[in-house]
Amino acid sequence: MAVQRMDNVGIVVQDLPRMVSFFTELGLELEGEAAVEGPWMDGCIDIDDAACDIAMLRTPDGHSRLELSCFRRPETPGEPESRPVNTYGYLRVMFAVDDLEDTLARLRPHGCEVLREVVNYEDVYLLCYVRGPEGLLLGLAQQLAG
């Protein structure tokens, strides 16, 4: 077998402390933060003289991790945008939550908004997509009893 597990999902952000605060409010645990740079990084990511600050967060079950990266150099091209859900490439990360309404209430002060509505999928899940800080698209799902 070639793959042992998916180690983490990486997201480039502009405001690392704000995004760490958002994801810890969601329920992820901060494992650590570091400043990374050097020839090993340049070779790995194919960008010369790169430097960034990273934060690694872990889901409560310990099986998944999220790496947030904020580049100090070179400047990150473009601005965060609110891409529609049918855009090619990275779309969203889906998180399972215990109580969707409570989660939304805690995330709204961090700039989180439901795209349209919370839906009930066949009495199995409550689901919604949200825009978080910096336009980040996330999915939230609460499994219903049954």
Image (spheres, rainbow, N blue to C red):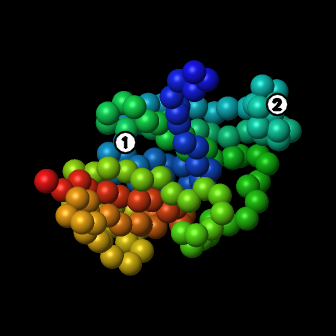
Residue reaching furthest to the bottom: 116
Specify whether 128 is left or right of 93: left
- Residue indicated by mark 2: 43
Residue 28's disc is 1
State the image coordinates of residue 91 (x, y, percent, origin top left): 56, 59
Question: In this orientation, does residue 32 appear?
Answer: yes
Total numbered labels: 2
Rendered image quadrant of residue 49:
top right
How far apart are labels 1 and 2 at the CA level?
30 Å
Which amino acid does the dot numbered 1 rest on? Leu
Residue reaching furthest to the right: 48
Specify whether 129 is left or right of 106: right
Q: Secondary structure at mark 1?
A: loop
State the image coordinates of residue 123 (x, y, percent, origin top left): 20, 64
Sequence-wise, which precedes: disc 1 or disc 2?
Answer: 1
Residue 71's disc is none
